[in-house]
Image: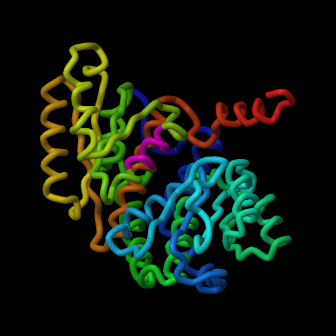
Amino acid sequence: MTSLEPPYGGADAGDMLVRIEALSAHVTGALDRMAARPWRPPVTAPGLVAVGALGGSAIAADLTAALFADRLPHPLLVVRDYRWPACVAGDALAVLSSYSGETEETLSLYREAGERGVARVAMTSGGTLAAWCGRDGVPLTTYPGGSPPRAALFPSWVAFSALLHAIGWFEDPTPGWREAAEVLAAGARRLGADVPEPANPAKRLARALHGRLVFVYAASERIGPVATRVRNQLNENAKLLGHSALAPELTHNEIVGWERPGPVRSMASVLVLRDREDRPETTRRLTLTAEYVAAQGAAVHEWSSSGEGRLARLASLVQFGDYLSFYLALLNGVDPTPIASIDAFKRRLAAPGA
């Protein structure tokens, strides 16, 4: 049986673990950088914030939008594509976010925002995006490079929430982030590699999910982007196909897919993510869904957020997903850091005639 106890073989495995165990420091470091170089947005109180981003950079915007959906005075739109919709014009603020600074979709959106005369800001560790911002005088916040983009979620999340405060959309998130850093530090002591499997819920759950198809279910209002993040981490760290869906929508369609007998059901596990601010109606739908799929033969597991404030609670769920995907990578016998298929895909895209 594969051990989940350190030491772990391979430099890449150790590199990813170091980054996961340092999430609390990622938050405090990002707060220090924002305090030293606060945002100076080109517009205040825009009528629309449109974020152009992919992957982990886009998830940071999704998480912020979900956190403050009941407080944001205007729409926040996340675009994962090459072109903006027609509404991104006039008094909009375009936020271009790419950890590497080389994401071709984000660079395309940067150019188009300029052509439309839309005010821009950007977040990156460098690359072409940083160079273009310097050339064009576009406000920019930077964070340390050299990390897989998915391991740099918290710096971009802190920066994006600070931007929304700078344009007057909600209160200063710094106190919430200070609590989040404390919750993440406590989470590392509970879920970290040095905690033996019998006492480590992330390791135990990874063992239970190993070899199964994983369905991540959550409430759409607040936890939806976390479900996406967990699925993405299963994809990239554990090299595992995963699926996520949100209530109440999934109870209007996906639940029917569990009716038909077949081997998939016995190979499936459902992970239900919970938060204390889930609406009672949605909580009941998730509970009934869990009961139904369990009756259909799937293994069901649940994990609830920790902390008091919203930021801390969502951060705790993200951290749990990061640890879970790392331990599943070990059980799958793969290094969590490399993403060979994405690298090969990018090479093919860049090839002449592709």
Report the residue at 56% width, 63% height from top: 50
Report the residue at 62% width, 66% height from top: 89
300 or 101: nearer the viewer: 101
Q: Is residue 257 visible?
A: yes
137 or 47: nearer the viewer: 47
Based on the picture, tell me whether residue 325 belongs to the magenta stretch: no
Give the magenta-colored segment's residue range: 227-234
- Relative placement, left or right, of 136 versus 285 is right
The quadrant where residue 144 appears: bottom right
In the rendered image, the vertical position of residue 172 relative to residue 72, given as above or below: below
- Relative placement, left or right, of 132 versus 96 is right
Residue 161: image x %, image y %? 50, 73
In the rendered image, the vertical position of residue 128 relative to residue 7, given as above or below: below
Report the residue at 73% width, 36% height from top: 346
22 or 338: nearer the viewer: 338
Residue 114: image x %, image y %? 74, 65
Locate the C terminus and report the quarter of the image it occupies: top right
- Relative placement, left or right, of 270 versus 283 is right
Color encoding of the figure: rainbow
Q: Main secondary structure of the magenta part?
A: helix
Residue 308: image x %, image y %? 27, 73
Locate the N terminus and report the quarter of the image it occupies: top left
Query: Which residue is the extreme one toward the top?
Result: 262
The quadrant where residue 18 appears: bottom right
Residue 94: image x %, image y %? 62, 67
Report the residue at 79% width, 76% height from top: 137
The quadrant where residue 111 appears: bottom right
Q: Is residue 151 visible?
A: no
154 or 66: nearer the viewer: 66
